[in-house]
Amino acid sequence: MKILQINSHYDQGGAARIAACIHRQLLAEGEESYVAYGRGEDPHEKNVFCIDKKYEVWLSAILCRLAGLNGWFNRRAARRLVRKIKEIRPDVVHIHALHGYYINFKILFDCLNREKIPCVWTFHDCHAFVGNCGYFFACEKWKSGCSHCPDIRRYPKSEFFDFNHYMWKKKKEWFCAHPNLIVATPSDWLTGAAKASFFGKFECVTIRNGIDARHTFYPRGREQCRKKYGYGADEKIVLGIAAGYKDERKGVKYMLNLAKMLESEARMILIGWDSENDAMLSGHSNITALPRTESADMLAEFYSLADVFVLSSLAENYATVTLESMACGTPVVGFDAGGTKEQLSDHKGIAVEAKDQQALLLAVRTAFLPESGLLRADALAEKIREENSVEQMTDAYKKLYRKLAAAK
């Protein structure tokens, strides 16, 4: 089989890492796999290519914000991708995230629909079936057309105009014209939302995200990792990922409040910190803020040395960072948002009501206790290897690819 994946990035962040894992596993299994991405560094990997130029992405982002139309620009990049599709002639196109200012939706789908190329579309958020935002939170306007958006400045934001209903209508027109498409999502929560949207005419299935839980994310030895990075054996350590803390969705204030509440009890480590957010750290004596790292080994060591990983997102699908922490033997505490509760079932973690600061604090304190009932170390890591391996995920997608190709 020839598979072409499309995503905004490659191996940078959740959806991009999933695309990379699938690509590498397909190649390892002897399949002909390709990935087209829009922005980010060249990974110098086989059959991975960028369709945008950096200035095109920046120009598209500016135009999107000024005009209020996301996915209407980047025509050159879309035409490059169409030429690649005609050159590769894939049996199946596997779409991930289309937002990110890198592709023209209409040009891409005109090609896919006209050529009747079978498609799997993995929803990593809600953008495909709402007017413009990534997550709808409590808003249900997406079910009837996304008119009069209450928050046009949420990513991907518009500075002036509300064209959400128009974008919703055009998405429905372009996307639903496809003759042979299956929607996949990592969580039952998002699968349910997809079925309730205009994508309900298609088959919608749940395929859990997978990670490399054998060679990359696995328990590294708590004591050794703490000694390596200068933390005491008896310290209580809370870990969080700080990337994207400008986005209110990430729940940064709940993490900072948590650090304050635990000031005399625990140290908080935030990885992925951007120095432009340093003002947020004022008055917090127990936070260690570390910059983003591209080293998976370093991430695994920090996951391994922590007592608990906290995910404070107010809207989430099926976060790979949660899987990575658990694969390294560290349980997770998070808000019950989107698919998070599904991830933390079976004693893998604790989900509490979103925005409940006291409940979050109590859950973290519970996770510190040996008698908490939470799985830890090798027992927790084994659970993730059983349920969320790259091999399982890729095999599930291969079954969809074969099903679509057979129906062509």
Image (spheres, helix red, strand yellow):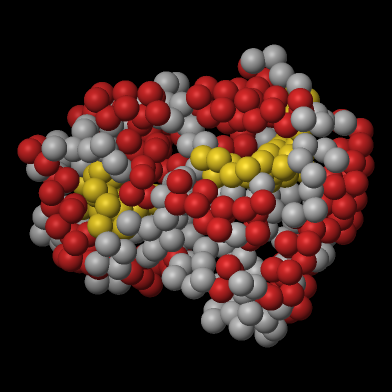
Residue with the most extreme top position: 30
Dividing the picture into quadrants, the one containing residue 166 is: bottom right
Q: Is residue 295 above or below residue 60?
A: above
- The structure residue drawn at horizontal position 34% and vertical position 53%, both measured from the top left corner, is 311
Q: How many marks?
A: 0
In front of the other: 354 or 320:
354
Answer with left or right where residue 179 lies relative to residue 97.
right
Dividing the picture into quadrants, the one containing residue 284 is: bottom left
- The structure residue drawn at horizontal position 77% and vertical position 66%, both measured from the top left corner, is 170
- The image shows residue 55 at horizontal and vertical percentages of 79, 60
In front of the other: 137 or 253:
137
- The structure residue drawn at horizontal position 60% and vertical position 59%, both measured from the top left corner, is 197
Answer with left or right where residue 205 lies relative to residue 226.
right
- The image shows residue 122 at horizontal and vertical percentages of 61, 44
Q: Is residue 44 above or below residue 40?
A: above
Answer with left or right where residue 367 lies relative to residue 154.
left
- The image shows residue 13 at horizontal and vertical percentages of 54, 46
- The structure residue drawn at horizontal position 50% and vertical position 52%, both measured from the top left corner, is 192
Is residue 362 visible in the rendered structure shown here? yes
- The image shows residue 142 at horizontal and vertical percentages of 59, 69
Question: In which quadrant is the N terminus drawn?
Answer: top right
Q: Is residue 73 above or below residue 116?
A: below
Is residue 22 visible in the rendered structure shown here? no
Residue with the most extreme front position: 201
Question: In which quadrant is the C terminus drawn?
Answer: top right
